[in-house]
Amino acid sequence: MGADPVGYAVLDLETTGLRPSRHRVVEIGVVHLAPSGRFTGQWCTLLDPGGDLGPRSVHGLTTADVRDAPAFGDIAGTLTGLLRGRVPVAHNLRFDLAFLRREFDRLGAGLPRLDRIGVCTMAEAARLLAYAPRSLAACCAAAGVRLERRHDALADARATAGLLQYYLDVTAPAPPWHGRLAEAAEVRWPAVPGTAPPRARPGAARHGSGAGDR
């Protein structure tokens, strides 16, 4: 008997650059939605990339911001638990999965093939939004979704979750990716250590609570 569908894990990553082979993840935001689209939790952490932070003009982070932040390996186990059993969702999913795959490879742990079960809100915009905008800001504007702060991982993940909720509404009662919920529940994940507490941006609201709610 298959496992029951759990829902969606909506991701956003802030990175030190655009190339997974050279650059690192510096912030991760995750928002959980039930299969219906109901919000069930969120989680976010800054990460110490162990080197140059890249374009501060994009993510706004400084060396001081990440000085006491965990490394990716310190939170990999927690992140695995947040993704396990869920359909991954992101705005430009290929980009985010490429960075996650590289980070897991650095730990010697392979990331499951998530691209085949994931939902890319940027790709879905081509048929679900008028004028087929591509940027997160333009898609949110077209769908009437609030985008609080650009290039803040949790704010962008929440906006992407809002886009997914809009897509679920306009494709009800059964979105084209509905069958992927059951597939995601069957994906086998490796055991990965690393459960350090998350660290939020300075001055940000506490992000670490409620992410495991289902």
Image (spheres, helix red, strand yellow):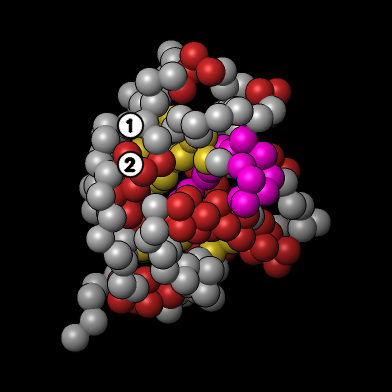
Q: Which residues are magenta?
A: 6-23
**To which residue does mark 2 refer?**
75
> How many numbered callouts?
2
Left or right: 126 with respect to 98? right
Q: Position of residue 131 (x, y in %)?
A: 80, 56
Q: Name which quarter of the figure residue 123 lies in.
A: bottom right
Q: Residue furthest right?
A: 131
Screen quadrant of the N terminus: bottom left
Q: Position of residue 85 (x, y in %)?
A: 31, 65
Q: Residues within 10 Å of mark 1 (few under 14, many from 20)?
A: many
**Disc 2 residue crowd, few under 14, some 14–19, many 20+, Cα 10 Å:** some
Residue 175 has which mark?
none
Residue 63 visible? yes
Q: Is residue 155 left or right of residue 87?
A: right
Residue 17 belongs to magenta span: yes
**Would you identify the image quadrant in which residue 138 lies?**
top right
Q: Residue at x 31, y 66 (%)?
A: 189
| Residue 91 x %, y % | 60, 52
Q: Amino acid at mark 2?
A: Ile
Circle 2 sits in a helix, a strand or a loop, which is it? helix
State the residue position of label 1: 198
